[in-house]
């Protein structure tokens, strides 16, 4: 990336409203979390098929989806705490112990929850089917994630349009 590209990107980010920058962060980080869990989601069905085990292991996909949705809900809560002037309602700069716990739980959950779901026998569904049917869960989780982000972007656009109409 050249210096001109960096400057143009920084200028574009500065033009964005705080809501847009937060949405961009949510989108990028959420997709990063899903990318990180993709390895487990794709490897488990192949591994089950190679070892001759039958049944669709839904645990990794459910773990990825739960982690993604929890991250989005947490970011929505943080966004609601912002005041109209761009500051936050928190008096202190130091995050509370609960906030630190939630951050660590969500970020580590992106790695460990799909892997945990892969070893739980209770998450095996359709026990007579080939394990490779589990590969169909991978695009389903991504579709749900894209749908959640699109709904959030539509909500942000309506809010921006309403604010522009008031001015």
Image (tube, rainbow, N blue to C red):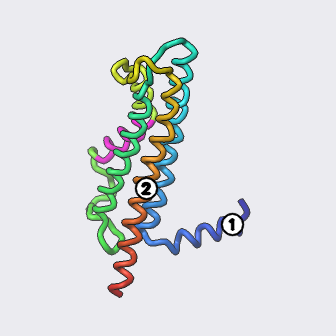
Do the residues under discs 2 and 1 have CB atoms within 8 angstroms? no
Q: Which mark is residue 5?
A: 1
Residue 160's quadrant in the figure?
Answer: bottom left
Where's residue 25, x and y in %?
A: 47, 57
Where's residue 105, x and y in %?
A: 35, 38
User: SS at mark 1?
Assistant: helix
Which quarter shows the N terminus?
A: bottom right
Q: Which mark is residue 51?
A: none
Q: Residue at x 35, y 79 (%)?
A: 163
Q: Residue furthest top?
A: 52
Q: Which residues are magenta?
A: 99-110
Secondary structure predominantly adopted by residues drawn in magenta: helix
Quick check: is 102 in the magenta stretch?
yes
Position of residue 80 in the picture relative to residue 3 (left or right): left
Q: Is residue 149 above or below residue 97?
A: below
- Residue nearer the viewer, 9 or 137: 137
Q: Is residue 132 above or below residue 100?
A: above
- Residue nearer the viewer, 92 or 100: 100
Where's residue 149, x and y in %?
A: 43, 56
Position of residue 54 in the picture relative to residue 95 (left or right): right
Q: Which mark is residue 149?
A: 2
Where's residue 28, x and y in %?
A: 51, 53
């Amino acid at each position: 990336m050249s210096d001109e590209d960096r400057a143009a990107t920084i200028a574009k980010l500065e033009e964005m409203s705080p809501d847009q920058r937060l949405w961009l962060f949510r989108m990028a980080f959420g997709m990063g979390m899903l990318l990180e869990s993709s390895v487990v989601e794709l490897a488990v069905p192949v591994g089950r098929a190679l070892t001759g085990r039958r049944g669709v292991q839904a645990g990794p996909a459910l773990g990825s989806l739960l982690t993604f949705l929890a991250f989005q809900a947490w970011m929505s809560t943080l966004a609601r705490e912002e005041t109209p002037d761009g500051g936050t309602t928190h008096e202190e700069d130091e995050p509370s112990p609960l906030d630190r716990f939630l951050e660590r739980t969500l970020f580590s959950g992106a790695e460990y929850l799909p892997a945990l779901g892969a070893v739980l026998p209770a998450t095996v569904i359709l026990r007579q089917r080939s394990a490779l049917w589990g590969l169909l869960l991978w695009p389903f989780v991504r579709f749900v994630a894209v749908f959640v982000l699109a709904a959030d972007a539509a909500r942000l656009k309506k809010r921006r349009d309403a604010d522009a109409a008031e001015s």
